[in-house]
Amino acid sequence: MRLLSRASRRGVIAAAAAGTLALGLAAALPAVNALAAAGCSVTYTTNQWQGGFTANITIKNLGDAINGWTLGFTFPDSGQKVTQGWSATYAQSGAAVTATSMSYNGALATGASASIGFNGSWTTANPNPTAFTLNGVACTGGVGPTVTPSGGPSRSPSPSASPRPSNSPSPSPSQPTGQTPVAINGQLRVCGVNLCNQYNRPIQLRGMSTHGIQWFANCYNDASLNALASDWLADLLRISMYVQEQGYETNPAGFTNQVNNLVEEATERGLYALIDFHTLTPGDPMYNLERAKTFFAAVSARHAAKNNVIYEITNEPNGVSWSTIKNYAEQVIPVIRANDPDAVVIVGTRAWSSLGVSEGGNATEVINNKVNASNVMYAFHFYAASHQGNYRSELERAAASLPMFVTEFGTVTYTGGGAVDTASSTAWVDLMDRLKISYANWTYSDANEGSAAFRPGTCNGGSYAGTANLTESGNFMRNRIRTADNFPTS
Ligand code: IDC
């Protein structure tokens, strides 16, 4: 089976599931304010695979400002279930679902939007819901690419195939071979709580993560990887290989090959390659234990002689205990070490690699019960618009005892979408710089979501160097990554 291209992913979405529903009502909202005008438009899109799907929902308030909201809808097929939501609190009774705002996204001014989403499961059919309520006001309407509400305020069309800006090639600072991150730093190892280079001096690697390579393979080509190395001056490429969601499990040989090729491309450019076994749903890494052993046996054998490969053995465990993750790690690490004994291995942490924080825990469970292997680091992930001071404090506290690596973070909310939170992103990157915590930003892609570095359409043939095709997030990250590295050489 061939890898799914991004175009065919679009086809799947369009054929199976995309629907846009826009509704505007000028109606009384009695429970809140008898005089308030209520109205909403809801965009509900899904990406589905056998048995599961992800839904992304954008709620736009077309009425008066509200402070707190509940979105209601009913699945047309009662076999559909919300399994894991984000940016809202979900409840389901039969086929009826409610999603209630969080403290940080409940206030919606007129015209403002909130983006939420969830992963779901389905049994026999997966049609999208076609009717929504917001704070009890029923919204009904047809499903189509765009349904303009009659009588409601006009709304601008959703960003579609974006206008491509003209590209003026910008001069790229060059990174001569002898000066590449790998040429300078060589084989890395963990020393104390740091990542150290061949001179046993602590360093920080700064780079970008691919999006899912099953969807965005067209973003990783000679031109884009040249730009990452020579224009962004990155140190690191994280290669994000989803296991589910049309990823590795559908074609192990094909995805192993795709990862291997990207490792070779990173190597040619003097970049470190971080191989991400991108488990996400289900959250229990044990579900993929045999696949992990097979995959890591293959990639570690292939790259054993290289000095630039780092292995991230599980992306974001969730809904499982630290002892389960540790058990998984202690079974997968020996498989890698049998081929590549000196490679650094990174282990995901509980609650989507939040050190447990997103499930009410903290780093103490790891500090008191470390993985029984040497040369191991622990992953921490954050999304700057969602995760703020308490997460920063926990990372800083953990980093005093544990070697930490931020293998994924976003400048936006943890849906991967929404606006860049510049203040929080700055605080986070400053913290990582100060503590010399290495990082990879989600994503070096042209996905149509705020976390992507490039505008939609760029990977169809646009240029990657310079700033012409960058999003706000891309600009922010390029500016931060391009600053001079501080790699001690003695
Ligand atoms: C998101 C992608 C989005 C995709 C979704 C489901 O940005 O396009 O539809 O995954 O596959 C993570 C995960 C990462 C998520 C990202 C943003 O590691 O896979 O990517 N995120 O939601 N953890 C926290 C946030």
Image: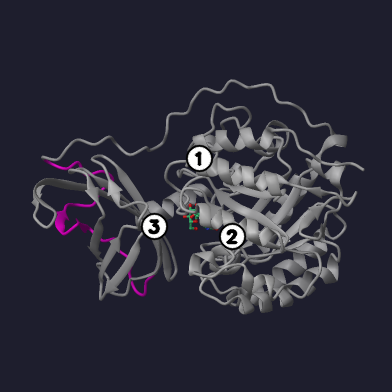
Q: Which residue is mark 1?
A: 423
Q: Quadrant of the C terminus?
A: top right
Q: Which residue is mark 3?
A: 87
Does 222 appear above or below 237? above
Residue occupying image coordinates x 33% and y 39%? 158
The reply, left or right, for residue 457 in relation to residue 435 is: left
Residue 272 seen anywhere in this rendered image of the structure: yes
Mostly what secondary structure, the magenta segment? loop
The answer for how far apart the CA atoms under marks 1 and 3 are is 20 Å
Kind of residue indicated by mark 1: Ala
15 vs 84, nearest the viewer:
84
Residue 355 position within the rendered picture, expressed as x and y whole percent measured from the top left: 59, 65
Does 366 appear above or below 254? below
Kind of residue indicated by mark 3: Ser
Residue 160 position within the rendered picture, expressed as x and y whole percent measured from the top left: 38, 38
Residue 7 position within the rendered picture, expressed as x and y whole percent measured from the top left: 49, 47
Residue 172 in which image quadrant: top right
Residue 410 position within the rendered picture, expressed as x and y whole percent measured from the top left: 54, 48
Q: Which residue is mark 2?
A: 394
Residue found at the far right of this picture? 490
- Residue 489 in the magenta stretch? The answer is no
